[in-house]
Image (cartoon, grey):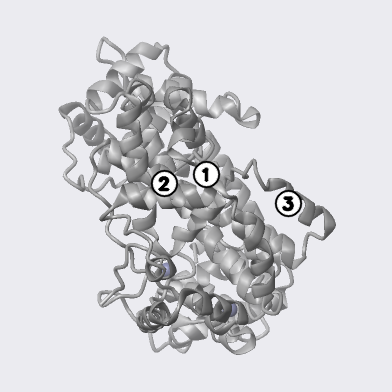
Amino acid sequence: MAATRTQSIWMKAMGAPDPTVNPDAWNDMWEKRLAVDPMASSEDILIKEHVDQPQVLLSQIRYNTQHLCRHQQFLSLAATEAFQKGFESKWLNSSASVRSKHLLEGFVRSCIMNPDGEGDRLYCSDLTLAAMNKDKGAAFIRLLKKYIHTDSSKIPSTPLSYPSPKWNYKLEAAKANDKNSIATAVWEWVQLGRDLYICRFLVGTIGSFYNEPRPSPPIINSPRASGYGSYNHEVVKDLKKKVGKEAVKVIDREWKDSKKETVKFCERCLKSEGPETELFKQCSRCANEVQRKVFYCSAECQREDWKQHKKICGKELTLETAKSTAVPPSGLPLFPTPPNTDDESKQIGPPTGGFKRSAALTKQIEQLKERKGSDTDYILFSCNGKSHDVQIRKSETTLKMAFQDVRKAAFTKGDPKSVIHLAQYLVHHGAKLAGASLSTSEILDQLSSEFPGVEIRRGIDMLEAFISQDPLKRGKTAVDLDAELKEEQVHATLNDRDGQAKSKEILREQWDADGTTKLFESIVNGQMPVEASKKKIIKDIYDAVIGDGDMAHALKLMENMGL
Ligand SMILES: [Zn+2]
Ligand SMILES: [Zn+2]
């Protein structure tokens, strides 16, 4: 059984009102507490608690960064969708009491989504119902916009942050004094708690505004969240004295229960281990050398995370590595797979999730399938019915991949964001790539009939407004940006193949773990028959990794094979 608290153990033990039962009283309690600026007293406690266990704090920073990035992707998706439905004007035109109702529910939901994060409201003294209702509700919209990523198709690797106007100077002062000190780490951690709290509150408020049901309480514990052992710390003992014997009993019991229910998360894909998954593997070097629990759902995730994980594997964390290694760079595999433009990526699967294709879309897909083996990525039609093939050159591999990814999401799920990205790209480049003179409105009309459920024109306007806010991205389409990012990652991966001895050692370890060594051995020995040309490639790779063959040559072969 998973823990299903809706409030922090401490707050509950201290007799605070239950947010789900008595939200008004609960919020009043918090607003009164915030009015006396509790931050001033908690700073010293936090530093005292962590000064003798910096690794505990750094693990928390890493874990919270990971979660903040996930929250922000989710928030960006929810907010983009809400803005498409006209959220901003609906919100501003609501009465203050309606807005207050949703804001209060937003705070409650923030607590339900992460009961252990309830206390982080301490760091959000600027977030009161009155403050969020300022300027006829515009204050809330401004706060929301601080946390929206332009590209919500993947987990951002750096979170957006909104420092507290009240105490950000303390973080800045700590950094200026010593950017690696415990004080700096404590303030960074406090800032993460604040950002996490605000993001949950924003998601919760939007959800309430659109009458979505309350989220269910999460499975609370992860090895990294609960495995700190700081419960017996002096500071915690002091706190326990303050809350009284009865409360301590409750806290102790809940703490024990929560320990039993520790859930393993995959380091790379953040999936959690459950009855329907395989047993997760643990990184033994991390466990043995730094007592850090690192899990993987599969050998594949472990392999793909290695480029990132090697920076901290078996090593103590620093504030820099805790933050920079928190989120895998957008799920790109360690060895990038060259696009397979002939078969698989051309195959557009059946619609999923109840998505119904329009007649025009079905026609588009049928015609694309007829062009199998060609370079055609999309077909545009003039108003006289003449077809024009949009072809992205094969040499532009990352762009082609990015386009096909977006197209797939649009074709199979009808995902509105992907449809808009697709349309935006076709409006900007479609006619030129097809070598035809097509007007923007011809292209938009066609896409609107293919995806009648999506407000394409409006979506493109919003997307472009977002993109142009960032001066570096001016004039680019979402697909271009995606491709640029992928390109960067491919280069980073290629350049990172430093020190062949190291690659070899890494590969050996991975191969032993995932059975590749045995598989390749049986091919090389002839026990498992494969085509002669493939056998030659595998033998070269095998000889380099296991024996002393040419490693650079092997890496190139593997890259070509998409291994
Ligand atoms: Zn995984
Ligand atoms: Zn490790």
**Element at label 3:** helix
Category of crowding for the residue at label 2, using alpha-carbon neighbours closer than 10 angstroms: few (below 14), some (14–19), many (at least 20): many
Q: Is residue 60 left or right of residue 548?
A: left
* Residue 465 versus residue 28 in the image, above or below: above
Frontmost of labels 1 and 3 is 3
* Residue 191 versus residue 262 in the image, above or below: above
**Element at label 1:** helix
Amino acid on which the number 3 mark rests in the picture = Lys
Which circle marks residue 195 in the picture? none
Q: Is residue 276 left or right of residue 231?
A: left
Q: Quadrant of residue 519?
A: bottom left
* Residue 535 versus residue 473 in the image, above or below: below
Q: Is residue 267 left or right of residue 210?
A: right
Amino acid on which the number 1 mark rests in the picture = Thr
Observer-nearest of 321 and 562? 321
Image coords of residue 190 (percent x, y): 60, 57
Image coords of residue 511 (percent x, y): 51, 81
Frontmost of labels 1 and 2 is 2
Q: Quarter for ligand 1? A: bottom left
Q: Which residue is painted at 55% across and 63% down in the image?
A: 334
Circle 1 is placed at which residue position? Answer: 397
Category of crowding for the residue at label 3, using alpha-carbon neighbours closer than 10 angstroms: few (below 14), some (14–19), many (at least 20): some
Q: Is any atom of residue 228 visible in this view?
A: no
Observer-nearest of 135 and 534? 135
Amino acid on which the number 2 mark rests in the picture = Phe
Kindly report the distance in space between the C-alpha atoms of the residues bearing marks 1 and 3: 47 Å
Circle 2 is placed at which residue position? Answer: 201
Which label's residue is closer to the chain start, 1 or 2? 2
Circle 3 is placed at which residue position? Answer: 170
Kindly report the distance in space between the C-alpha atoms of the residues bearing marks 1 and 2: 40 Å
Image coords of residue 390 (percent x, y): 40, 28
Q: Which residue is painted at 29% across and 36% down in the image?
A: 209
